[in-house]
Amino acid sequence: MKQKKESSEKADRTDQPAPLVTEITPRSQDFSRWYTDVVRRAELADYSPVKGCMVIRPYGYAIWELIQQALDQRIKATGHVNAYFPLFIPESLLMKEADHVQGFAPQVAWVTRGGDEDLEEKLIVRPTSEVIIGTMYSKWVQSWRDLPILINQWANVVRWEKVTRLFLRTTEFLWQEGHTAHETEEEAEAETRRMLGVYKEVAEVELAMPVVDGLKTESEKFAGAVRTYSIEALMGDGRALQAGTSHNLGQNFAKAFDVTFQARDKSLQYVWGTSWGVTTRLVGALIMTHGDDSGLILPPRVAPYQVVIVPIPRGNWQETVLPRARTIRQELVSQGVRVQLDDRDMYTPGWKFAEWEMRGVPLRLEIGPKDIEKGQVLLVRRDTREKIPTPMEGLAGRVREMLDSIQQSLFDRARQFREDHTTSTDSYDEFKTILEGRPGFVVSPWCGDETCEAQIKADTQATIRNLPFDAPQPAGRNCIKCGRPAVTTAY
RNA sequence: CGGGGCGUGGCUCAGCCUGGUAGAGCACUCGGUUCGGGACCGAGGGGUCGGUGGUUCAAAUCCACUCGCCCCGACCA
């Protein structure tokens, strides 16, 4: 019975004509396959021989570098400095903060042997650096005058995940992790919120990705934190993605690692800590937010190439079209535009159009003999595919305007999508009906009780993403599951 | 870790049910004509069929074990 079904499925597949070109899976058909296809065909990343580990290819890394720059600049502008802490952490240090151990132990990679000797004390490969940094802070802090400590590090961490996906969840990933120590609780809370604001700004301004900022529930917070805040984005398949987190650690780690200082009133106090991070997952978020059936669409601010120039090879184009293309490149580069001139003669223009569209370049500039006659070029927007003949005069200005316009319209489009996929209800039946249909955010009142949260999750698979600072529309006053009011929730 | 699916040139797969010369499209190499939306013609190169063992005159195909990958759950950034 089973076998029969299999063979008929195979027969069906055979009837499909083989595609002329290896196409990417349409986004609407299978979002997950589409995602993987785009990542690999656009040469962003690839699977490595090491299980769960990803190789970030130059084009993908260039995107990450732009995100890094945008973040690093803002992290420094808010008074932080960069430093580096070790990759290995002794087992005994990890064990000091109970919640933290519980949260991370299942995901930790161990080093038990060095050279030809078994280690006396096992080492872990950092899954995050609170532990090692807390240890160092305890040495560095004596007085209230030593505070605050505002340190960030760019690093890789390892978490032994069972299921991995390129950029979204890999065994090893790159990130930025900020770790701060403060004199007062209020200061720590302000810092936690400030950095979440930085993340929101980077997501929205640089990645053109609207996010919901808010407080995580107790069950979803970081292991060892007092409070966790997050930014949550809605992907093109209607599913939420946590794009960044900021934790108020209270005095938990200070107590575990004995980070004390003598306060202004001469008393001995524990510092108040925060930590916050975003990862290479942002690259994945970018892809899933903006991409379409033709592949990637990059917002200009994080596009390694903002403009690709495709010269049309006609007649003796090498003597006529190409020099003009080079001049244009020069002009755009001098105006701070990132430009790629694709003068390879082994590919046809049509091939290049498709190729660069797949790789998400926001703006294409075509130039051929006809354009030169007319003193113009043809600009083609990746987001709308609009073809815009543009005079050679004042070209750089027009290009920059258009890049800004693409950045803005990608954000608007993503925000519109999110609005279209956000519903508000205070009825549990309605809530369940919504989730059975189109996925997306649902805004609903919740009492704050973990048992309700767990029940909802068990019933519908929906998770509380966070408790938004700005709830879109407060729907009703009573918890959709039991009774009392408290907060609003998303998907 | 539970449920399902799949391992055959670089990629996507056919061939397996019913054992008997290892295939297609794309990609790649060379030559030529092309080029404003994934060009065409001709000639080539490349696979111990995931691994191990078994059945057989004969195994990609049947059997057992094993390794790996993908999807859906549980866990996470």
Image: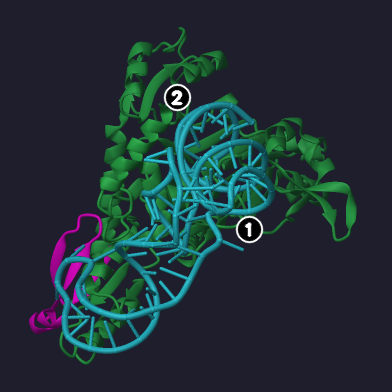
Marks 1 and 2, how far apart at CA: 39 Å
Badge 1: few (under 14), some or many (20 or more) residues near its Cα, within 10 Å?
Answer: some
- Relative to A239, does residue A289 appear above or below in the rendering? below
Task: Classify residue A445 by image quadrant.
Answer: top left
Residue under circle 2?
A: A462
Q: Between residue A229 and residue A175, name the one nearer to us.
A: A175
Residue under circle 1?
A: A81
Give the letter of the chain under mark 2.
Answer: A
- Relative to B56, does residue A98 appear above or below in the rendering? above
Badge 2: few (under 14), some or many (20 or more) residues near its Cα, within 10 Å?
Answer: many
Say whether disc 1 or disc 2 marks the residue closer to the N-terminus. 1
Chain A is which colour? green
Q: Residue at x 79, y 35 (%)?
A: A255
Q: Position of residue A22 (x, y in %)?
A: 32, 58
Q: Residue at x 27, y 74 (%)?
A: A309
Task: Please give left or right for residue A84 compared with residue A335 in the image.
Answer: right
Q: Please, what secondary structure does the residue beneath circle 2 have?
A: loop
Q: Which residues are magenta?
A: A362-391
Q: Between residue B43 and residue A100, name the one nearer to us.
A: B43
Q: Please, what secondary structure does the residue beneath circle 1 have?
A: strand
Q: Position of residue A399 (x, y in %)?
A: 24, 68
Q: Position of residue A276 (x, y in %)?
A: 59, 44
Chain B is which colour? cyan
Task: Classify residue A226 by image quadrant.
Answer: top right
Q: Between residue A154 and residue A156, name the one nearer to us.
A: A156
Quarter holding the N terminus of chain A is top left
User: Which residue type does callout 1 highlight?
Assistant: Val
User: Which residue type does callout 2 highlight?
Assistant: Ala
The mark total stands at: 2
Task: Please give left or right for residue A208 compared with residue A184 in the image.
Answer: left
